[in-house]
C-alpha cells in the first residue's frame, strides 16, 4: 500500500495549477491523501481562493490523473476550505 501511496503522490505532481504552472503538491493545495488496501483513494484539496473559477477543472484533473493509475480502483476528491490556503503553504522554489 505504501507503494501505491507514493505513486499517487508522484502522479499528483503532474496536475498543474494553470495560473502558476506549479503542481498542486508544490502549491500546498493538497491537504490530505488516503489510500486503502482496496485501491480506493481519497484526496482533500483546496484552491487558492474559495471562489476560484478553476475549482472544478482542478478537481477533475486530480480525478483523471489518479483514475488512470495502476492499482487505483476509485477516486474521491473533496474540495475543502479550512484551513484557508495561503502562499505559506507553497514549497520553496
Image (cartoon, rainbow, N blue to C red):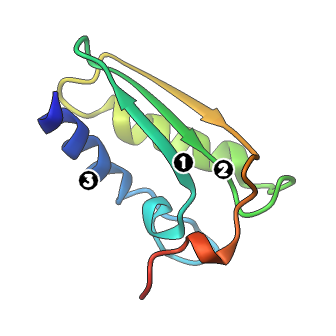
**Residue drawn at (70%, 62%) of the image:** 85
For the residues bearing labels 2 and 3, Cβ distance under 8 angstroms: no
- Which residue in the structure is indicated by mark 2? 46
Direction from residue 82 to residue 15 in the image, left or right: left
Q: Which residue is mark 3?
A: 10
- How far apart marks 2 and 3 lie (CA) works out to 18 Å
Q: Residue at x 18, y 29 (%)?
A: 70
- Alpha carbon separation for disc pair 1 and 3: 15 Å
Q: Position of residue 9 (x, y in %)?
A: 30, 49
State if disc 2 and disc 1 touch (CB < 8 Å).
Answer: yes
Point out the residue furthest to the top here: 38
Which residue, as the protein is rendered here, is positioned at the far right? Answer: 51
Under tag 2, what secondary structure?
loop
Q: Secondary structure at mark 3?
A: helix
Q: Nearer the viewer, residue 73 or 85?
A: 85
Q: Earlier in the sequence, mark 1 or mark 2?
A: 1
Q: Quadrant of residue 26?
A: bottom left
Amino acid at each position: 500500500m505504501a507503494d501505491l501511496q507514493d505513486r499517487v503522490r508522484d502522479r499528483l505532481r503532474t496536475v498543474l495549477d494553470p495560473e502558476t504552472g506549479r503542481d498542486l503538491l508544490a502549491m500546498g493545495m493538497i491537504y490530505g491523501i488516503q489510500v486503502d488496501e482496496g485501491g480506493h483513494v481519497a484526496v482533500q484539496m483546496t484552491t487558492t481562493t474559495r471562489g476560484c473559477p478553476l475549482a472544478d477543472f482542478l478537481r477533475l484533473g486530480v480525478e483523471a490523473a489518479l483514475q488512470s493509475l495502476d492499482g487505483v480502483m476509485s477516486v474521491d476528491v473533496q474540495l475543502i476550505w479550512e484551513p484557508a490556503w495561503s502562499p505559506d503553504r507553497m514549497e520553496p522554489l
